[in-house]
Image (cartoon, rainbow, N blue to C red):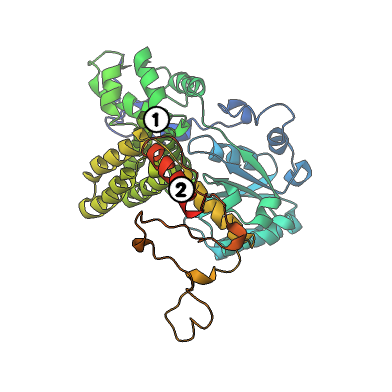
Amino acid sequence: MADLFSPDADGDAAGGAGTPGVPAVLAGAPLAVRMRPRSLDEVVGQQHLLAAGSPLRRLAADGDLGRAGPASVILWGPPGTGKTTLAHVLAHAAGRTFAELSAVTAGVKDVRGVVEGARRDRDLYGRQTVLFLDEIHRFTKAQQDALLPGVENRWVVLVAATTENPNFSVVTPLLSRSLLLTLRPLTPEDVRALLHRALVDPRGLAGELDVDEDALEHLVRVADGDARRALTALEAAAGAAFDDRAAEGRPRIALALAERALDRAAVRYDRAGDQHYDVASAFIKSMRGSDVDAALHYLARMVEAGEDPRFIARRIVISAAEDVGMADPSALQTAVAAMHAVAQIGMPEARIVLAQAVVHNATAPKSNAAYAGVNAAIADVRAGRGGAVPAHLRDSHYAGAQRLGHGAGYVYTHEVPSGVAEQQYAPDELVGTDYYRPTDRGFEAQLRERVARLRRIVRGR
């Protein structure tokens, strides 16, 4: 058998579409593009959306999307879960004209042009136009508003894709006129099935190479639920396998080769999207929950994703005050010092400073008593509780203040031997109200006894 890299009689690389040195199965479009499903039956995963009789099935089969339900569809999910694939399946059904725009490059003029063209095709030729709009969350409110007349009058059927929560990134009028479909990350089984299909499918690698089981598992793990990443990783490993094979041998992807071909797993994390808030939330909750290892994991994810270290440092400062509080007052000192150090040092060394502050927060005893106390006090203020400041606490330094009785009877505590005097400080309505309730954890256990003693003295009990 002729080597795949050898020129054939016509001078082209065998099967390589005229590209010297490129195997046929790696020539042409990227593997992820070639393996894009052509129908819903070829879609891997998303079974919660693909059941018989589901809106998605009806939308794909019906010649008129408007009769099947809302006149627009928003596909929301992480990268690589099939949003673009589903959009193409819906748009390319019989009797539909397909138009595609990207929110990264398109403006209001482009949107209006498509809408007007769709209206003309509907009125003159009876054709329905499906507009696929990728990354709709990048559209401004004005740009999204430009879509409304076309969607509402069903001149155009909008199929939009987004990685961000549409409830925050899509205008309400457009969202209310849309069928929102939430896509989930692919399971390891889904990714494994996708890779097996790509290995044997004529559109993919056509059975031209083998993959060791541990190498396949590595590719599944690196993909992290992202179909596009899985296929891109497989393609990179396949290219390395063809490069490394013996002259007449069959290419094989071994674990070492797969690891060498894939420098490292790309971190799935969109600093401007949902993942930003999800990872930050998990980071804070892990510190609060005293899971130092999980907290360091989420710190690493943010660092590797290129998150601004100053943002991370600010979250640590907030956590030190909110969750550690007076159970370990030094946690706030560490966090604030870390915040200033990060600003002065920068990455990559700043990760070490952040890690120290994270470990301090996560391992410290926890108390949100100060946080809960100020919230309770704010709630009373907003409810109108409080009343006038007691006269003896009012400012007595201006002319006429004494005539008003300001400062009369005030006890200067430094003149009292104990340094604490019996005296009313709170407004009449709030006398005896306890906002701060110390816990029995860490330093606050000692503080609890002191607070109780101070209250007894101040309140004359």
Is residue 328 or residue 90 the one in the foreground? 328
Q: Dividing the picture into quarters, in which one does residue 86 lie? A: top right
> Which x, y percent locates residue 238?
33, 24
> Which x, y percent locates residue 387?
61, 66
Give the residue type at disc 1.
Answer: Asp
Q: Dividing the picture into quarters, in which one does residue 24 lie? A: top left
- Which residue is the extreme one toward the bottom? 399
Can you tell which of label 1 and label 2 is closer to the viewer?
Answer: 2
- Local SS, label 2: helix
- Which residue is the extreme one toward the right? 67
Give the residue type at disc 2.
Answer: Ala
Residue 291, numbered circle: 1
Q: Dividing the picture into quarters, in which one does residue 386 lie? A: bottom right
For the residue carrying disc 2, how many other residues have a C-alpha within 10 Å: few (<14), some (14-19), or many (20+)? many
Residue 370, numbered circle: 2
For the residue carrying disc 1, how many other residues have a C-alpha within 10 Å: few (<14), some (14-19), or many (20+)? some
Above or below 145: residue 321: above
> Which x, y percent locates residue 105?
47, 57
- Local SS, label 1: loop
